[in-house]
Structures are given as structure tokens and as C-alpha cells.
Amino acid sequence: MHTQSPRCRRRGHFFFAVARAAPGTRSASDRGPAFNPRMKCAPPMTPVMPLRFFRVLAAAVALLLSSAALGQDLEAGKEVYGPCAACHGAYGEGGKGGEYPRVAGQSVGFTVASLKQFQERRRNNLPMFPYTEPRELSERDMKDVAAYLASIQLPTKPPEFKDTDSALERLVKMERVLVVPRVEGDTRKGRALFRKQCAKCHGPSAQGKEQKGAPSLVGQYPSYLQKQFDAYRKGERGAEKDDPMKGTLDTLSAQDLTDVLAWLTSIQDETPEAEGDAAP
Ligand code: HEC
Ligand code: HEC
């Protein structure tokens, strides 16, 4: 039987409850200060307070810890993103009219999967290779940079300025506004086609679905999307072996895809519709 100081006993209960109630909290050893390895208290054998009290407390603390950990990820991700900004822009808005795609606002899952595809050279793109070498970009870095990019929202309308905003502040606010060029075409046909053949994975308003690994297509440069259409059709995109996009574009004519782009670029500043509104 080991002895514990009263302080130790109190904290032992507390942290044991947190650790048990929040198995997903990743601050266990690497980040948050709460799981301080210096704290060597053994978990207590008998509860001294009602368990429900600890559960509530644990949930509150877990929430605090996970947002703190997320904050650290975002900071780390911002740092990882440094060299990427040269091509993808300061806010992940992309550049050169879509030669460099927008990467802001995509789901963590899609960005990590894309980076792996470049790293493993399944997806062929010379400019991306040096930046995704394992030496340059660890798995941890991929997740951090993906979390950072997912957290960036790019408005489609100019912000309201305050009288006190300096010229520089106005410029910075304006820089984030991203409106991609419109494509001419039949938006009604494009929408119907999309709802029928693409929405189940990309969402009714093409906002992407993380659980399907499908990216948002709204607010992406149409020239970039067209390039990806061509790559899929030629079998050159090189995603997974069981590529979810495989065959999805085969029945569509070039005009159909132009109509889809016309619709996608016409809904940039609309609020995405929820799943239930997806009727074609
Ligand atoms: C030298 C320019 C350059 C740099 C630097 C660069 N990229 Fe890219 N990136 C590209 C190009 C070009 C593409 C488009 C590839 C294609 O056409 O398929 C791309 C594509 C991507 C995509 C896929 C987006 C999509 O929707 O398909 C992601 C994600 C991405 N880059 C993230 C990053 C990250 C993160 C970094 C930094 C670690 C980075 N890039 C650095 C040029 C660059
Ligand atoms: C079965 C699910 C599924 C369906 C249906 C589907 N997609 Fe996708 N799509 C995906 C997934 C998953 C990805 C990401 C995989 C990858 O990186 O290749 C993707 C990627 C894309 C991309 C690349 C975007 C980027 O930023 O790199 C485009 C463009 C695209 N889809 C367009 C379409 C269109 C248009 C349709 C309908 C004609 C469609 N998709 C139907 C699952 C689907």
C-alpha cells in the first residue's frame, strides 16, 4: 500500500476521471499541461465524491483541453503552412487563376488524403513533390496543416469596414475575399445533373462531405476543376485504388461538365442547403 499526500489524492481522482471520460483527448502526453507526467499519483481505489460530479467536471475539463489542443494544432499548422503560401496564397485562397488551387476550407480528411497522394507520388504533380517529402512533411504536420486550412473561411463578399480601419487593415480584409470567375452555361441543367450524380458524395450544395472524403467544389477555381475532370477521365488523377470518382464522369459530355461548372460558380455566395433539401 503506497501513501499519497492529500493534494495528490485529490488530483489523482480528478485526473483519473478526466482520463477515463475523455479517451479521445490527445493531450495525454504530448500537449496539454493537465496530464503532467510529473504527477505520479496512483489512481485512487475508492471514490470519495459521487461519480456524477466527476463526470460533469471531466466533461468540462475535456472540452477545455481539446480546444486548447486544437489551438496548438492551429498554431503548429500555421507554421507548417509557411512555405505553402508561396503558391497557395497567404490564406489558402490559391493563385494564378487556379493553377494553384484554393486549399482553405477543405476538410481535414480530404487535405491529408491529398497530401499523402502527392507524397506517395500516386497523384502526379511536380510542384507539390518537394513539399510533401516525408523529411519536409511528417504525418503530424499533415494533420496540423490540414486543421489549420480547414479553419480558414474565405468570404465571398467585401467586409464592412469600420471608420477606424486603417488602409492596411482594409487591404488585409479585402485580400481574404475570394470570388472565382463565373463560367457560362446552363446552370439549371448543371444543377440537376449535379444533384443526380454528384450530390450524394459532394453534398447538395457541393460543399463536400468529410465522411465520404469528397472535397468542397464551391469556391474552387473552375479552371482547376476542369483540369481535374480531365485528369479523372484520363485515369491520371491517381487517387486510391478503389477511386470513388472512378466512372462518375464517364457518362457526361464536355457541355454537361461546363454546365456543372456554370452552376457551381453561380452559387458561391449562397448558404449551403442541408441534406434534406437535396431534391433535384
Ligand atoms: C511550388 C508551388 C506549390 C507549393 C509550394 C505547394 N503547392 Fe500544393 N499544389 C500546387 C499545385 C500546382 C497543385 C495542383 C495539382 C494538380 O493540378 O493536380 C497543388 C495541389 C495541392 C492540394 C490539392 C488540392 C485539391 O483540391 O486537389 C493540396 C491539399 C495542397 N496542394 C496543399 C499544399 C500544402 C499543404 C503545401 C505546403 C506543405 C503545398 N501545397 C505547397 C503547388 C504548390
Ligand atoms: C461515390 C462518391 C462520389 C461521387 C458520386 C462523385 N464524387 Fe467527386 N470526389 C469524390 C471523392 C472521394 C473525391 C476525392 C478523391 C480524390 O482526391 O480523387 C472527389 C473529388 C472530386 C474532384 C476533385 C476536386 C479537387 O479539389 O481536387 C472533382 C472536380 C469532383 N470530385 C467532381 C465530381 C463531379 C462533377 C461529380 C458528379 C458528376 C462527382 N465528383 C461525383 C467522391 C465522389
Image (spheres, rainbow, N blue to C red):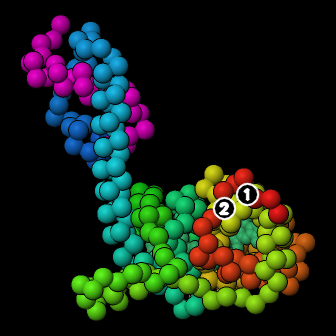
Q: Is residue 100 above or below residue 35?
A: below
State which quadrant residue 274 falls in.
bottom right
The residue under label 2 is which amino acid type? Answer: Glu
State which quadrant residue 180 falls in.
bottom right
The reply to whether dot 2 and dot 1 touch (C-beta < 8 Å) is: yes
Report the residue marked by disc 2. Answer: 273
Q: Residue at x 24, y 21 (%)?
A: 13
| Magenta stretch: includes residue 119 | no
Q: Residue at x 35, y 25 (%)?
A: 55
For the C terminus, give its image quadrant.
bottom right
- Disc number placed over residue 132 in the picture, else none: none
Q: Left or right: 34 with respect to 201?
A: left
Report the residue marked by disc 1. Answer: 277
Magenta residues (range)? 1-27
| Magenta stretch: includes residue 3 | yes
Callout 2 crowding tier (Cα within 10 Å): few <14, some 14–19, many ≥20: few
| Residue 269 in sight here | yes
Where is residue 279? Give x, y as percent: 80, 59
Pick the front one: 154 or 274: 274
Q: Left or right: 91 with respect to 242?
A: left
Pick the front one: 245 or 197: 197
Q: Secondary structure at mark 1?
A: helix
Query: Ligand 2 shows up in which quadrant of the image?
Result: bottom right
Mark 2 Cβ and ligand 2 under 8 Å apart: no
Mark 1 Cβ and ligand 2 under 8 Å apart: no
State which quadrant residue 138 falls in.
bottom left
The residue under label 1 is which amino acid type? Answer: Asp
| Residue 85 in sight here | no
Q: Secondary structure at mark 2?
A: loop
What count of labels does the image hold? 2
Label 2 – label 1 distance at C-alpha: 6 Å
